[in-house]
Image (cartoon, rainbow, N blue to C red):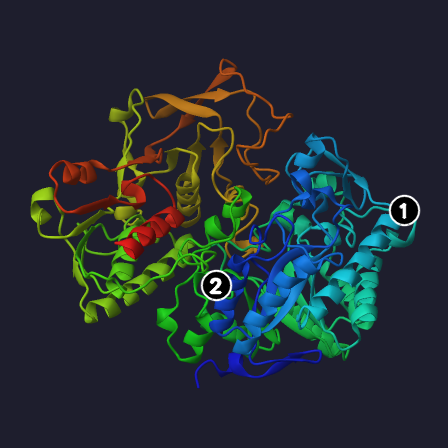
Amino acid sequence: MPFQEFFNIGNIGKCKLKNRIIMAPIGNINMADPIGRPLDKMIDFYTERAKGGAGLIITGLVPVSYGIDPTVSEDNKTTYFPRIDGSSRTRLSGWRDLTAAVKPYGTKIFIQLSAGLGRVGSPEPALKGKILRSASWCSNFYIPKVPHAPLSDRKIKKIVRMFGQCAANAKISGFDGIHLHGHEGYLMDQLTSGPWNRRKFGRYRNNFQFGIDVVKEIKKRCGEDFPIIYRLDLTQALQQSYGDEIFKKRFHGKERTVEEGLEFCKALYEAGVDAFDVDKGCYDNWFWPHPPAYFDDTVYAKEIAGRLKDYFVENKIDAKVIAVGKMGKPEKAEAVLQNRWADFVMLGRPLLADPYWPVKVKDNRVKEIVHCIGDHDGCIESFKNGGHPCCSVNPYTGFEDTKKSLKADKIKNVAIVGAGPAGCEAAITAHKRGHRVTLFDKKNTIGGQLALASKMSIKHDIKRYIENIQYIIDLCVKEGLKVELNREIRTDDIKDKFDVIICCNGLRTVFPHVKGIEDMNYLEVKDLLARDLMISEKIEDILIIGGGIVACELAYTIANEKCLNVTVVGKNKELMPYTTLANRAQMLWMMMGKGSPSGKAEHVLKKPITVYTASSVFKFSDGFAYIHANKGRSDPYTPWKALIPENVKNPFEKKLKDENVEVITVKTDFIILATGSRGDDSLYYEMLKNNAANEIYSVGDASRPGGVWEAVNGANEIARNI
């Protein structure tokens, strides 16, 4: 059988698992009621992954430290996290419902318990007068001028006891084990590693002690046979990521090295841990624990999980190792097991994109897997902005309780104009519901803007996604879906021929006028991508106008693949202001010549990309660009800080004065315009004006520019309800 390695029976402690596929701790934020009891939304979310064949599911983060860490609570003692602390039977009823729903499918379930957030929690409680806490005096990650005071030993011991109570509650609620959230720079990591724990006195000056105490407390309360998985970053990799100067200045020259991480795992094993889920990095280099699309697959599996597995074999330690980090491609994940770098593989976002990943792999239907594109827009950015985890490419993720695709009561003739992600989703969903669907596109391929983006090698996840969608479209064509490419549609072409028209025809480019640009060589970004990034050999110096994600991805691609001098000019205070932290941080890391998609130093840019933020080009002349640059602009690169949501006020934010500018000249012989686009709604309104069909809709970029999440979810909403 193909992919047999995944489907060998395994065990974690006394817990037997039907396969080697573990769902990572993801989800559940804003999936509980205000007192922390799981809702049907959470139960249905995890049940769908159990139906999909995962051997073990681990819940998302569940804090234990209410009343101690103020960042886990909101106004009026509410919380966006689920709770299992104390002895509330009201809360436990929700957890019992969850475990009862998952287990009939042969899937085991562990709960992830967390000490809290500490310095990586929201600074809002401090702005309302509360004292924030951490292992030592630390700065808040989001607003560094907000301090965190050290927890007392007494409070830390109380957190230890709270872990024990929560674990006992989990056991009687039907959970099969505990997953300890000791990584990524959260409070448990802060208490057990050098960058944040600089205590000189007391029990917890020893970085290992807190983790050991928590494990022993859980074993004491729940018994030696109740298994524990401990998740930790084997190293924070701060020195590797930032370099010596910033490492010493910002992190006191301290981090958990791999060697210390191995010793810590040994100590935790001796305390009672049954398995280790190991990754790399923390919030300050979030691209490591949350690898974006730019990274290669299984980017650190051998380096981290493989190193720990070797250490356990050498030292005759009978603990299991779980590998994480871009495991979504079955052939790559299976290689991790075949090479004995780990005993299990852990999938997070791949199981959001396709809950049935395990079933499809087992049935050798891997081409049907809907692949994660690594944009983090649904799974992370959504809850950062007040929502709950969902998925850009799977519109049902996080909405399992409300979204159902049912056969249509009345079969309709449906025309879909545009075969980008919105058009393809609308076509597939409407077809599966039984409608007679025709999908049109003026180009000779599907994919729209994504097809252009996939021409950049760093967008390999997008390329895989498009191949996957093409395969599904082809299956639908065999069942009767019609696809007409190379056909540009006008109103008269389809008026009165369809019951429903869905306009998914994309964007209209916006060109800024800059004096003298007509005398320069220039292209709009989509035109350059359409030409497969063909640039004359005579070109040496490229200027990109625009500081968004597309501009930066293109800048890196050109600098990396063409070895040209690249300058980026953006009008905002920050580059990529609307891009998720992990993706934004990794792109900055690569642009400044510190990192690469392989994660290896030998593959970094030889010359960093020059960037001017809070700046604008006002004229071109004689091969030079003239830039108005704000003198108050900050370093565009480091540190890779998170940009807080617009609805959270930062009282320390530095305001730039518009008149405080300097003129900078930059040599350039080729200009790329990446200044954004507007929705092309002209066809939609023309259809409405001419009453072209009974039902007319506009979704995706044709309605409003957005990402894949907006396109796919909007299209699915229409297609499920026509």
- The residue sitting at the right extreme is 201
Q: Quadrant of residue 309?
A: bottom right
Q: Earlier in the sequence, mark 2 or mark 1?
A: 1
Q: Secondary structure at mark 1?
A: loop
Q: Quadrant of residue 666?
A: top left
Q: Residue at x 24, y 67 (%)?
A: 476
| Left or right of 687, for residue 575 | right
Quarter holding the C terminus is: bottom left
Where is residue 22 drawn, in percent x and y?
57, 70
Where is residue 669 drawn, in percent x and y?
33, 32
According to the picture, the residue beneath numbered tag 1 turns out to be 200
Where is residue 364 drawn, in percent x and y?
39, 79
Q: Residue at x 38, y 34 (%)?
A: 544
- Residue type of the residue flagged with mark 1: Lys
Q: CA distance from mark 2 to mark 1?
A: 43 Å
Single out the mark in the foreground, 2 or 1. Answer: 2
- Residue type of the residue flagged with mark 2: Pro
- Mark 1 closeness class: few <14, some 14–19, many ≥20 residues within 10 Å: few
Mark number, residue 428:
none
Q: Are marks 2 and 1 in contact (CB under 8 Å)?
A: no
Quarter holding the N terminus is: bottom left
Q: Give above or below for 77 relative to 99.
A: above
According to the picture, the residue beneath numbered tag 2 turns out to be 350
Where is residue 108 drawn, in percent x and y?
60, 74
Between 421 and 174, the residue placed more toward the observer is 174
- Res 658 visible: yes
